[in-house]
Amino acid sequence: MQYFRLVDAGDPAVIDLFVDDAQMFYPKFGHARGKAEIGAFARGLARGVSRLQHELDDFNVIAVGSYVVVEGAEHGRTSSGIDFPDGTSSFGVFCNVFEFEGDLIKQVHIYVDPDFASTHADGVAWGESVQADIAELRRADKT
């Protein structure tokens, strides 16, 4: 949980939770290798998100061996002032898969839609079209 608290606070000490040669994956960003690259990713995320809050009390956590999987929700505000999620095209749901080496993070894969505020028009249009198709199916099932 310390990882998420530090991320939410924008605390650069989060990097101290990683081994020196840690690896990270984030959608639309790709892979970062080592503390310097992970730190650069964090600074870049902070440029796009002015406030981030994970709903710590509602996490689903699965731990097996050196792996910990955390599923949860987050909300916040982009640096352009848009609150997220909007509950229509963005939902604030994420899943992180951590691998630990002792008490430190060796690897983390973060699975989240990086379009926090539904500003990526093509992706939003696709999602809305799928939602419309599902609504149509649900209406048909009721008849």
Image (cartoon, rainbow, N blue to C red):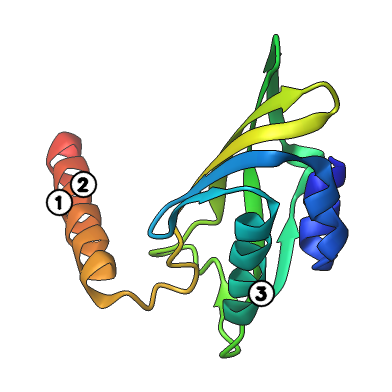
Q: Residue at x 70, y 16 (%)?
A: 66
| Left or right of 137, for residue 36 | right
Q: Secondary structure at mark 1?
A: helix
| Left or right of 5, for residue 132 | left
Point out residue 19 in the picture as x, y percentages from the top left corner.
Answer: 75, 37
Q: In the rendered view, would you say 43 is above or below 63?
A: below
Distance Cα–Cα, label 2 vs label 3:
35 Å
The disc label shown at residue 133, or none: 1
Q: In the rendered view, would you say 100 is above or below 109?
A: above
Residue type marked 1: Asp
Residue that carries the numbered disc 2 in the rendered image = 134
Q: In the rendered view, would you say 99 is above or below 4?
A: above
Which of the two residues, 124 or 64, is positioned nearer the viewer here?
64
Q: Are marks 1 and 2 in contact (CB under 8 Å)?
A: yes
The disc label shown at residue 46, or none: 3
Q: Residues within 10 Å of mark 2 (few under 14, many from 20)?
A: few
State the quadrant of the N terminus: top right
Which of the two residues, 131 or 101, is positioned nearer the viewer here?
101
Mark nearer the viewer, 1 or 3: 3
How many labels were placed on the picture?
A: 3
Point out residue 99 in the picture as x, y percentages from the top left corner.
Answer: 65, 26
Sequence-first disc among 1 and 3:
3
Residue type marked 3: Ala
| Left or right of 53, for residue 93 | left
Point out residue 7 in the picture as x, y percentages from the top left corner.
Answer: 77, 58
Distance Cα–Cα, label 1 vs label 3:
35 Å
